[in-house]
Amino acid sequence: MKEIRLAVATRNAGKIREIRKALEGLPLRLLTCEDFPDWPVPEEEGSTFEENALEKAESLARFSGLPSLADDSGLEVDALDGAPGVSSAYYAGRHGDDAGNVARLLTEMEGIPSEGRGARFVCVLALAGPRGERRLIRETCEGRIAEEPRGEGGFGYDPVFVPRGHSRTMAELTLEEKNALSHRGKALRRLRELLERGEPTWLFSDPS
């Protein structure tokens, strides 16, 4: 299998680290936004994770002329009718304010008992080609919201998310443990399986 150059449409160092770990050993040369500093990162204005992931992947594919991978992910909390959802990254008002987002979530969850704190992480991966090709992968991780942050690892809402069947938060798990059960870990394993089978075929085709 020839080496494929794949652009990754995120500036999130944590996501890039997880993607590299999940896809290591494959004949891939992963390029990041640092390789395309002039890429105008699109605003995430979609109403679904699928729309946002595709917008980012297709934008970078057009800009770079390379197949591109993007993810859109977030937290859905049952007691909040699915919020913060696609607004997860800027729930507190400023994009990427992890501490602020967690603080707002915990404030809104005050007084809700353990049995009412169900939630899930959602991840949608989008592969896009420079000629309009596209492929989507969606995975989830069920769990509940802790009453206070715990752990120093991970990012985003990891310190307050306890995966189903576990007592530790995502931020208390090792990267290997997290990848084994997380929404993004599941999606990346499905992506790896596709790539190992030579799919999608357009990714491995020479440009005409």
Image (tube, helix red, strand yellow):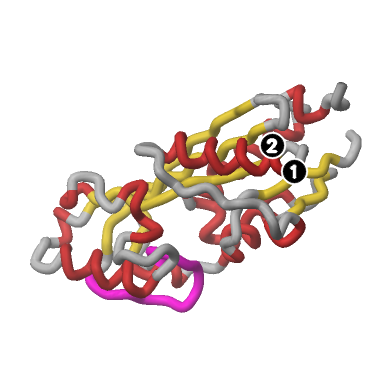
Q: Position of residue 2 (x, y in %)?
A: 90, 36
* Residue at the limit of the structure toward the left, as seen here: 111
Quadrant housing residue 12: bottom right
Vertical order, 162 against 84 (above or below): below
Q: Is residue 6 magenta?
A: no
Q: Which residues are magenta?
A: 147-158
Vertical order, 65 against 141 (above or below): above
Q: Is residue 151 magenta?
A: yes
Front-lying residue, 197 or 71: 71
Quarter of the C terminus within the rendering? top right
Separation of disc 2 and disc 1 at Cα?
A: 6 Å
Q: Position of residue 11 (x, y in %)?
A: 60, 60
Look at the image and tell me whether residue 164 can be seen. Answer: no
Is the Cβ of the residue at disc 2 closer than 8 Å to that at disc 1? yes
The residue that label 2 is drawn on is 62
- Residue at 32%, 72% (x, y): give it: 100
Q: Is residue 69 left or right of residue 138?
A: right
Secondary element at image label 1: helix
> Amino acid under label 1?
Ser
Crowding near the residue tagged with mark 1, few <14, some 14–19, many ≥20 C-alpha atoms within 10 Å: some
Q: Position of residue 203 (x, y in %)?
A: 76, 30
Q: Position of residue 40 (x, y in %)?
A: 61, 51
